[in-house]
Amino acid sequence: MKSILDNRNELKHVVDNVAEVASYLWQKGWAERNGGNITVNITEQIDDAVRQLPAISSIYQIGTTLPHLRGCYFYCKGTNMRMRDLARWPMDNGSVIRILDDCASYVIIADKPVKPTSELPSHLAVHNYLLGKGSHYRASLHTHPIELVALTHNKLFMEKDVATHILWSMIPETKAFCPRGLGMVPYMLPSSVELADATIRTIDDDYDVVMWEKHGVFAVDSDIMSAFDQVDVLNKAALIYIAAKNMGFEPDGMTDAQMREISEVFGLPK
């Protein structure tokens, strides 16, 4: 059976990267059962032939109007699909959707009528915000990194930038590769409009990775591999912190002066 990926190397590369990241999430234990979601804006990889493809699904309502997404295309993980299956068969466990001209509904166009995740409205709301501000970010990732989630069970780490400062201080790479730190959102019902709105407000504060209390992280970046890298680096720092605590001592961490030096040498955002 013909796939939308056939003879479209750039589009296939994007989807292959999604599959690769899905495999990492499963291997790390961050994607139990059908946990986690990936949504990537693939509009730049879409050609005229794809634009002419008919819908293979009914029209689905997003539940809100997203004016910056008119005519956009997304690859989305399917609802109730497992990351470990998406890693092997991305077009059986995800689909390509087209946002319709009303900016409030979408149809599936390829390869199979796999309905996207129930969290699609919140993912799309973030993408709408990013496009509206002229961001080059095209990928969003939600996953459940064990050690980062564990930190949120202590209210101290939910205070603004407390966790960021600790994680930055564990190893120089954290500050270098996650210079905007970790935004914190208090517990809200998964998939809710309130959670989506709180996530957008936190991203608007200049965070690229947002921690949902007792749930998981939501990360955005230019591509899905870069979004994964940020979460991976932050969770490594959490592992170092927890390892030191398990050894019976409070880790010293890098000093503020040492972290400022890293920011100055590498020209990182303040």
Image: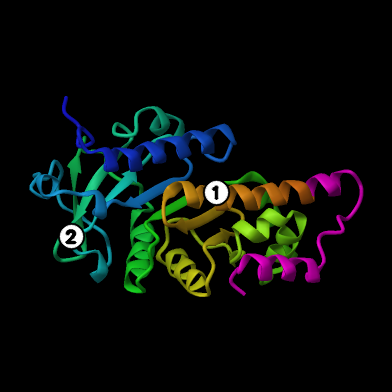
Helix, strand or loop at label 1? It is: helix
Q: Earlier in the sequence, mark 2 or mark 1?
A: 2
Write down the region rendered in magenta. 242-270
Q: Percent position (x, y) of residue 241? A: 78, 51
Quadrant (top left, top right, bottom left, bottom right) of the N terminus:
top left
- Tell me how far mark 2 sits from mark 1, CA to CA: 29 Å
Instruction: Give the tally of numbered discs.
Output: 2
Residue bearing the label numbered 1: 229
Residue bearing the label numbered 2: 71
Residue at 79% in and 70% down = 256
Which residue type does callout 1 highlight? Answer: Asp
Q: Percent position (x, y) of residue 24? A: 53, 36
Q: Quadrant of residue 161?
A: bottom right
263 in magenta: yes
Helix, strand or loop at label 2? It is: loop
> Is residue 32 something that shows in the picture?
no
